[in-house]
C-alpha cells in the first residue's frame, strides 16, 4: 500500500509528464488503496482487531459486511464533510463573482507594484483565515487574484503565497484550521492560550517567505482585461453590494454556527448557500435572463468539479492508510524517539508538521491526541497546532488550502515545489524556532 501510495503521488506530481489528469490518478489511487484494505484480513492485525471488537457486539457480522456498511462509510463520511464544505464555499464565491461583488474590493486596490500587492494580499489572507478558515480564505483570495492579475505565472506565485499565509493564519486561531478546531473542541487548548502562544510563530512563518520574496519581485502586475461578455446581463449596484455582503457574512458566520450548535462546519456552509439561493431566486424572480446566468444552479455548473474529485480521491487514499494502521504505526515510531522532554516532543511535533505536507494533518493530529495525555494548554498541543497547520504549506497537496488553489488555478506540483516549497519551509522552521524560544524563555 505504501508503494502504491508513493507511485500515485509521483503520478500526480508529474501530471504534465504522464499526461494523465491528477483527478483521475487520485480517484484510481483511492479505489486501489481501499481494495487493499478489503483484502487485508486476516493478515492485518490493526484491521482484524477492530473487526473482532465489532463482532463481539454483532457475532453474525462478516468482515466484508462490516467493511462496506460501517468501516468504509465512516471514513467516507469524514471525507464527504470536507467535500460538501468545499462545494458550498466555491459556489458562494462564484455567486459573488457573477454578481460582480468582488469589483468593490479590487477597485480599491489601486497598486500594481508586485511587492506591495503581495504584502497586501498575504496579510489580508493571514487575518481572514483566522476568522474564516484556510480553505475558504484561499478560495476567496484566489478569486480576487484573478481580478487583479492577468499573467498566469504571477497568479500562480500570488496564489502559492496565499496558501502559505492562509495556513499560517489558520494555525493560531481555534477556528482557523481543522486541526486547531479538533484540539480546541477536545479541550486540549483554550482559545486565549492558542492565540497568545502561537500568534507570533504563525506570523513569522508568513513573514519570512514574504521578506525573502520581496527581494526577488520586481516590476508591476498586468491587470486582466475586462470580460464583460461573459455575463450578457447587467447587475444593479445594490444587488452586487447585497450579494457581496451576504456571501462574505454567511461564510464568516460558519465558525459562529459551529460554536453555537456544535454541528460540523459543512452544515453551516450549506445552510449559508441555501439562504443565498433563496435570496437570489427572489431577487431575480422578475428577470429571467438574470435568473438564468446568476442563479445558484448556474454557479454549481461552473464550479471546478475535477478539483472536488481530486479532493475525494486523495483524501480517501489517506483515509485508507489510516484505516490500514500505517498512521498508527507512524505514531508509535515517533513516540520511540530517544530524547528527553521537551526536546523529544519538539522533535515529534516538528516531524508531524513536515509529514502533514504529504499526509493529511487530520489523522496525524488525531493519532497524537489518542497517544498522549498532556494537560490542557500544554506546550505539546500548542506546538502541534502550529506545526500541523503550517507544515502543509511545504507541498501544494499538503493542505486543503493548497489543493483548492491547485484546482482553481491548475498550479503545477513541480512548479510549486521549485518556487514556493523552500520559502514555506523557511517560514515553517523560523516560526518553529520562535515558538521554542518563546517557550524556553517564558518557562
Image (cartoon, rainbow, N blue to C red):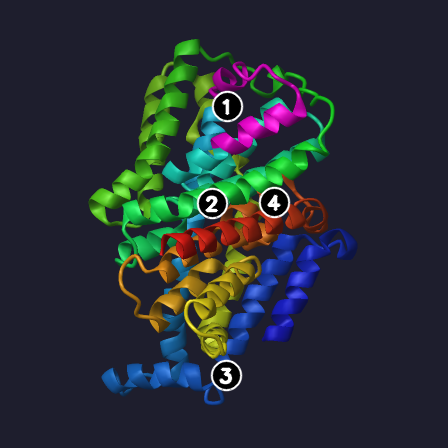
The residue that mark 1 highlights is 98
The residue that mark 3 highlights is 40
Mark positioned earlier in the residue sequence (2 or 1): 1
Residue at the (44%, 87%) spot, across then down: 45
Q: Is mark 1 on a helix, strand or loop?
A: helix
Q: Position of residue 351 (x, y in %)?
A: 53, 65
Query: Which numbered circle lies on residue 147?
Result: none
Q: Distance between the residues labelled 4 and 3?
A: 33 Å
Mark positioned earlier in the residue sequence (4 or 1): 1
**Apparent side of residue 74 relative to residue 364 in the rendered image (left or right):** left
Residue 109 within the segment the image draws in magenta: yes
Q: How far apart are marks 4 and 1 (CA)?
A: 22 Å
Q: Distance between the residues labelled 2 and 1?
A: 34 Å
Residue at the (42%, 58%) spot, across then down: 384
Q: Distance between the residues labelled 3 and 1?
A: 49 Å
Q: How far apart are marks 4 and 2 (CA)?
A: 23 Å
Residue 266: tell me if it is visible: no
**Vertical arrangement, residue 184 with respect to residue 327, above or below:** above
Q: What element carries label 2?
A: helix
Residue 103 within the segment the image draws in magenta: yes
The span shown in magenta is: 99-124
Amino acid at each position: 500500500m505504501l508503494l502504491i501510495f508513493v507511485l500515485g503521488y509521483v503520478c500526480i506530481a508529474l501530471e504534465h509528464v504522464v499526461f494523465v489528469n491528477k483527478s483521475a490518478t487520485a480517484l484510481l489511487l483511492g479505489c486501489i488503496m481501499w481494495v487493499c484494505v478489503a483484502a487485508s484480513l486476516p493478515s492485518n492485525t490493526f484491521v482484524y482487531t477492530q473487526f473482532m471488537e465489532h463482532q463481539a457486539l454483532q457475532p453474525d457480522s462478516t468482515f466484508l459486511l462490516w467493511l462496506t456498511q460501517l468501516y468504509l462509510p465512516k471514513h467516507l463520511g469524514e471525507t464527504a464533510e470536507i467535500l460538501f464544505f468545499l462545494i458550498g464555499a466555491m459556489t458562494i464565491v462564484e455567486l459573488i463573482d457573477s454578481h460582480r461583488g468582488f469589483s468593490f474590493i479590487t477597485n480599491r486596490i489601486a497598486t500594481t507594484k508586485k511587492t506591495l500587492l503581495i504584502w497586501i494580499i498575504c496579510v489580508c489572507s493571514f487575518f481572514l483565515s483566522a476568522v474564516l478558515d484556510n480553505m475558504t480564505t484561499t478560495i476567496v483570495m484566489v478569486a480576487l487574484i484573478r481580478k487583479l492579475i492577468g499573467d498566469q505565472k504571477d497568479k500562480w506565485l500570488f496564489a502559492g503565497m496565499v496558501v502559505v499565509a492562509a495556513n499560517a493564519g489558520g494555525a493560531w486561531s481555534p477556528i482557523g484550521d481543522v486541526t486547531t478546531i479538533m484540539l480546541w473542541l477536545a479541550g486540549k487548548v483554550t482559545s486565549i492560550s492558542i492565540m497568545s502562544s502561537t500568534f507570533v510563530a504563525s506570523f513569522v512563518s508568513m513573514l519570512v517567505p514574504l521578506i525573502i520574496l520581496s527581494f526577488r519581485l520586481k516590476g508591476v502586475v498586468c491587470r486582466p482585461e475586462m470580460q464583460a461578455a461573459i455575463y450578457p446581463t447587467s447587475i444593479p449596484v445594490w444587488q452586487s453590494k447585497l450579494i457581496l455582503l451576504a456571501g462574505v457574512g454567511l461564510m464568516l458566520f460558519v465558525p459562529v454556527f459551529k460554536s453555537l450548535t456544535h454541528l460540523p462546519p459543512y452544515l453551516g456552509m450549506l445552510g449559508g448557500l441555501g439562504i443565498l439561493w433563496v435570496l437570489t431566486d427572489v431577487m431575480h424572480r422578475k428577470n429571467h435572463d438574470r435568473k438564468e446566468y446568476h442563479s445558484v444552479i448556474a454557479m454549481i455548473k461552473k464550479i471546478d468539479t475535477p478539483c472536488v474529485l481530486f479532493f475525494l480521491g486523495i483524501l480517501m487514499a489517506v483515509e485508507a492508510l489510516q484505516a490500514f494502521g500505517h498512521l498508527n504505526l507512524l505514531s508509535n515510531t515517533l513516540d520511540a524517539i530517544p530524547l528527553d522532554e521537551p526536546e523529544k516532543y519538539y522533535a515529534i511535533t516538528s516531524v508531524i508538521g513536515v509529514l502533514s505536507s504529504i499526509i493529511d494533518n487530520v489523522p496525524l493530529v488525531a493519532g497524537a491526541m489518542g497517544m498522549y495525555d498532556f494537560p490542557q494548554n500544554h506546550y505539546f498541543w500548542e506546538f502541534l497546532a502550529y506545526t500541523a497547520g503550517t507544515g502543509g504549506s511545504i507541498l501544494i497537496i499538503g493542505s486543503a488550502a493548497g489543493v483548492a488553489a491547485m484546482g482553481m488555478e491548475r498550479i503545477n506540483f513541480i512548479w510549486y515545489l521549485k518556487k514556493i516549497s523552500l520559502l514555506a519551509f523557511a517560514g515553517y522552521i523560523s516560526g518553529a524556532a520562535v515558538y521554542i524560544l518563546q517557550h524556553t524563555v517564558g518557562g
